[in-house]
Amino acid sequence: MKIKVSAPGKLMLMGEHAVVYNHPCLVTAVDKRLYVEAEIIDKNEDEIIAPQVKESRFVLEAIAYFKKQFKINQFVKISTNGDFSHRVGLGSSSAVTVATFKALSLVFNISLTDRQIFDLSYHVNIAIQGVGSGFDIAIATFGKTTYFVTGGKIIEPLNIKPLPLVVGYSGIKADTPFYIRKVREAFRSRQTQMDSIFEEIESLVEQGKALLLNSDYEKIGALMTKNHQLLQQLGVSIPKLDLMVEKSIKAGAWGAKLSGAGGGDCIIALVSDDKRIVVENAIKSVGGEIITVDNNAEGVKVEEEV
Ligand code: PMV
């Protein structure tokens, strides 16, 4: 049997960095997906075909961990491909890990709940990267727009519509582990100040969650902009991201912020339909690239069984 599954990429809506320190965040799944095909092969080693070297590390580690957990000694062929490039920071490593576990569970006929897929994938993510809250693993698994607390203490998909977001890519690849370490160093040297920023971020996330359930975009936009200012205080923004955020707001967005670790990758702007084109042009005018994605997408799922 050959199986094809997919898992979505992500965009952080609010709460990045604070979520590493036991605070909640809001994250949404995008409709760009990572695909994994798997089949059992009659060979004496596994075969991985992955266009990105980084992805094959996650696939290999997932296979090894899965076989160890479920005492399997057969071999598999896994091939991956994606709707999106890993350069824009939409979360290809987490999506490929989640999709690999789902595919392995199906070819080896071991039933796994989404929670188990999350736990296995988070283990692999930490084994390879050493740091991270697991928000990207949770969204690749559960999809939708989700309220998440560190390590999966809470994973709560919200029953809402897709958000009217514009996504602008800075052209700079973010180095997530670098920025996580940078915040950690700041946390060690001025914990009280950092704690109070994290508390403020948490309050925005809690308000944002309630407003999302009412689709109150104007107020959510204001919270996003405030969240961006707090990220500036954490020292993770860069002039290019600040400029894209500023231009979006000036062009009439309800609010805007960087999304993710900072230092590059994307900004998100919340916009009404009549302002979308103006905001997109404003982002382009300062060298940003518009990434066309929808959000609130489905979590990991089976695409095809042959
Ligand atoms: O850079 P991204 O999109 O992978 O986001 C990182 C978000 C952090 O909160 C900084 C780290 C994490 O694992 O939660």
Image (cartoon, grey):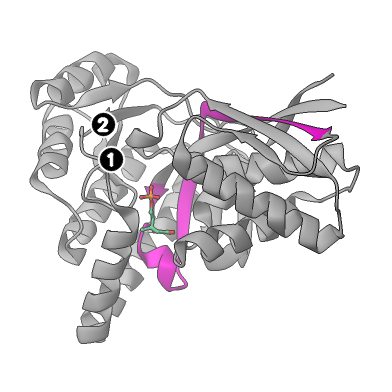
- Percent x, y for residue 57? 53, 48
Residue type highlighted by circle 1: Asp
Q: Mark 1 CB in 8 Å range of ligand 1?
A: yes
Q: Give the range drawn in magenta.
A: 13-40
Q: In this view, does 231 lie above or below 243?
A: below
The quadrant holding residue 18 is bottom left
Identify the disc placed on residue 188: none
Q: Name the residue under label 2.
A: 169
Q: Is residue 198 above or below residue 257?
A: below
- Left or right: residue 300 versus residue 262 is right
Q: Name the residue under label 1.
A: 265
Q: Main secondary structure of the magenta part?
A: strand
Whichever of labels 2 and 1 marks the residue nearer the N terminus, that label is 2
Question: Is residue 35 visible in this depiction of the protein?
Answer: no
Task: Please state, as top left, top right, bottom left or bottom right, where the C terminus lies in the image.
Answer: top right
Q: Do the residues labelled 2 and 1 touch (CB within 8 Å)?
A: yes
